[in-house]
Amino acid sequence: CVPVTAGALSGVDSLYSIVQMPGGVPVATMAIGEAGATNAAIFALRLLSVEDKAIAKALADFAEEQGKIAEESTNELI
């Protein structure tokens, strides 16, 4: 679930409604807003990648690229 950013609480109320699910109702809760939507998509793709090698390869490539971006950002700070 991706908490929706809306209202005076900026999505925190949505987050609380998700994390209070009773036992027997499993949820995978992501960050609030756009970052959460991105992470939800990646999470879904990871599930699908168990059976789909093309998705697994694309995710591995994506992770490698993200690592390079993080390394470059770190180098800029040094």
Image (cartoon, rainbow, N blue to C red):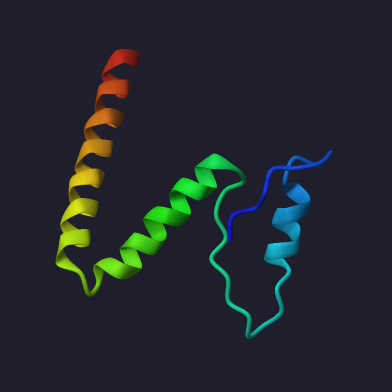
- Where residue 59 sits: x, y (%)? 24, 53
Is 11 or 69 nearer to us in this picture? 11
Q: In which quadrant of the rendered view does residue 46 lie?
A: bottom left
Determine the residue positioned at 47% across, 56% down: 40
How many numbered dots are placed on residues in this image?
0
- Where residue 26 sits: x, y (%)? 58, 77
In the image, residue 23 above or below residue 1: below
In the image, residue 41 above or below residue 69: below
- Where residue 14 sits: x, y (%)? 73, 54
Determine the residue positioned at 22% across, 37% down: 65
Q: In which quadrant of the rendered view does residue 1 lie?
A: bottom right
Q: Residue furthest bottom?
A: 24
Determine the residue positioned at 75% across, 62% down: 17
- Where residue 27 sits: x, y (%)? 58, 70
| Quadrant housing the C terminus | top left
Is 32 or 72 nearer to us in this picture? 32
Judge whether residue 68 can be spotted in this image.
yes
Judge whether residue 78 can be spotted in this image.
no
Determine the residue positioned at 20% across, 69% down: 52
39 lies left or right of 71: right
